[in-house]
Amino acid sequence: MKKRVGFPNALLFYKFSILWTTFFQELGAEIVISPKTNKIIKDLGVKFAPDEDCYSTKLYFGHTLYLKDKVDFLFIPRIGSDHEVNVGCPKFIALAEVLKSMFPDLPKIIMPFFSMAKKNHGRFKILRIIFSIGFRFTLNPFRILIAGKRAFDAQSKYDEELKFSEEELHKWENSKIFLQNLSIQEQRKTPLRIALVGHPYVINDDFSSVNIKNLLLSRGIDIITPDQMPKALIENQMEKLDYNMYFNYAREILGTTMHFIENNSIDGILQLIIFSCGPDSLIGEMSARYSSRKPGTPLLQLVLDELSSETGVLTRIEAFLDMIERKNEFRRNEENCHLHSLILDH
Amino acid sequence: MPFTFPHFGSLTHVFEVVMREVGKNDLLLPKKPNRRTAELGARYSPEFICTPFKLTLGTYIEMLEEGADELGSGSCHSWCRFGYYWPVQKLILEDLGYDFKFICLDYLRPYILLRTLQKEIGNGCSLQRAIRAVRIGWIKNRLTDLVDDLLYKYRVIETEKGLSEKMAETAFKIIVETKRLRDIKKLRKQLPEFFKKNIDVQKRDNLIKVGICGELYVVYEAALNLDIHKKLNELGIVVKNTVSLRSYLDMGLKLNPFVKSPYKTAIKAAKPYIENKCGGETLENVGDIVLCKKHGRDGMVHLYPFTCMPEIITRSFIPQISQEYNLPVLSLVLDEHTGEAGFSTRIEAFADMLIRRK
Ligand code: SF4
Ligand code: SF4
């Protein structure tokens, strides 16, 4: 019988799902992924996770507990950092061990540790991890190697497809192309363009983001998310800071916000912030201050937690969109006036 | 250019010493944070940032009002928010219209630390002098920790109320003012005698001993922990801090092959629960809780600021450890809203439980 490996569908799974699932699939394991966050999972998490933890971690607890009796192994890697200098959120390192300590009856947890920045882990460490996991499922070292290779290839292909080139981004900023397939086009001639920034596991999780992404799409609004932004562009923005943004995953978020604040090329920025999240408390403040220093592009920050409701969020977004519309209207009128006066001058 | 830095319990003296050693005499020593400091800090801080941020921001504002214009801050590159304190505080203070310069000391990277001391604070002093300053810093840090320990013991058994506190003040003064290395080293023996000679005690045996662990700032800064040390002392409990800045600063301890560093021992003891560093003092704290009985303590108090990431992790292990070792552990979260009354009740209940167990 195939061994079943469970993947809690939360946090970094949103970033590395392809890598992880491909690897185990190639090893011949049965993949069990917890469903998209729903009410049951949320309630489990909120009930059993430590009170002070961030909402996203609470959801992770919920996903893990949901999988508890359905799998032989849980895969919860301890990722310290995947960059030479910059690190991840401390919660990622400790998750596996915290879960094991709080819930002794969980299935066996596979928890490889990887930390490039502080431990200098590199290819060699990855090989060791691959083999130490692989031998639990197959005795054939070639199969393990191939599984590893395919997994990494699949992930980098996925990442590449996700990212836009700078050229494409430029075209989008100038309304030459649309990113989303806006089937439900409203009467709008040119759709609004908004950057939806936040952790990938918040933006893409319809439940924890109270469905914001779909809400925007259904209004015929074209959105871009930080993981689609060209890497060079983000790094470029980070260079401008007088400190090093060493939370690796926060770089994308802050960089995206900074880029659009600087270029003033889109209609608005919508930032989703998780209550009591460490990195968010900082980049939220930074974004707000940078934006108030260069207030061209409106910025709306929404703080989300287990108590957020769709209606509450909806009102704020409506107000935000109205404000943008009014602003654009005003700008258009001004441009017209300008044009008139130019004509009259001649 | 008056230079200032955040108030940090007894470590304030250590910071002062290091600055003076590199020749920075234009110091504006920070005031103890009070209610106004907390309010100021909280008003301008991000909503759910960890509490030390708010208090240190409040301190900076108060000191800027008094004329400081160089602000010293720690910094790091680790799994914790501490390294972003100064960038965000800088943005906030700039928006408030202050004119100042931040000087940040990266205590996890010795070379950079020395460079900053040399160039930015010491006005181009020699590298030797910077090294000496840091060395004196850690040696004196051992002494300030020693005085803390003595105070937290003598305050329980003193006959004249308040005398040990006065003695501790004097002791800190002596530590700061002693200049020659030879004299400083002698203090290690002299300070305990100084306490013994000057304070009349009422001998009591079977004293209850409790270790206090947690996030560094909240453990050291009485303004944030509502002086929990004193509260426990008044309930007849001897306390000792298990965390210390020395786990980073004390190179002498790290390099000395003959002395076992208590921090390393703690990290080892934490291994069965959590293996890898995850910012802050998580490993040391988990280890110290595990080793509680071995160190002859009757219980542990774990303090952490609201939303502190590393210490929430520590907190999550406490139920398991306390069950396995049958330990009383009190974990308390603190922020600027923590009420005196509820806090005291919890401490008293904990003390009662310890007394009953003994
Ligand atoms: S980055 Fe923020 S939301 Fe994500 S796990 Fe860490 S604290 Fe939670
Ligand atoms: S250790 Fe905790 S309180 Fe201190 S800076 Fe880090 S997150 Fe904040």
Image: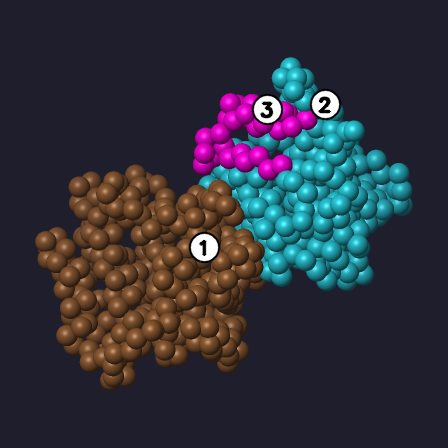
Residue B35 seen: no
Q: Which residue carries the number 3 mark?
A: A131
Circles 2 and 1, Cβ within 8 Å, touching? The answer is no
Question: Which residue is at 31% across, 41% downward?
Answer: B110
Of all residues, the one furthest to the bottom in this rendering is B160
Kindly indicate whether the residues beneath marks 2 and 3 are on one polypeptide chain: yes
Q: Which residue carries the number 1 mark?
A: B290
Instruction: Identify the mark at residue A130; answer none if there is no mark.
Output: none
**Chain B rendering hue:** brown
Question: Which residue is at 45% across, 55% downward?
Answer: B290
The disc labelled 3 sits on which kind of residue? Phe
Q: Distance between the residues labelled 3 and 1?
A: 33 Å
Q: Position of residue A309 (x, y in %)?
A: 77, 60
Q: Is mark 1 within 8 Å of ligand 2?
A: no
The disc labelled 2 sits on which kind of residue? Glu
Dot 3: chain letter: A
Question: Which residue is at 38% across, 64% downward?
Answer: B297
Q: Where is residue A104 in the image (x, y as percent from the top left)?
A: 63, 50
Q: Where is residue A61 in the image (x, y as percent from the top left)?
A: 68, 51
Circles 2 and 3, Cβ within 8 Å, touching? The answer is no
Dot 2 lies on which element? helix
Disc 2 packing (10 Å; few <14; some 14–19; many ≥20) = some
**Chain A rendering hue:** cyan
Kindly indicate whether the residues beneath marks 2 and 1 are on one polypeptide chain: no
What stretch of residues is rendered in magenta? A110-137
Residue B208 seen: yes
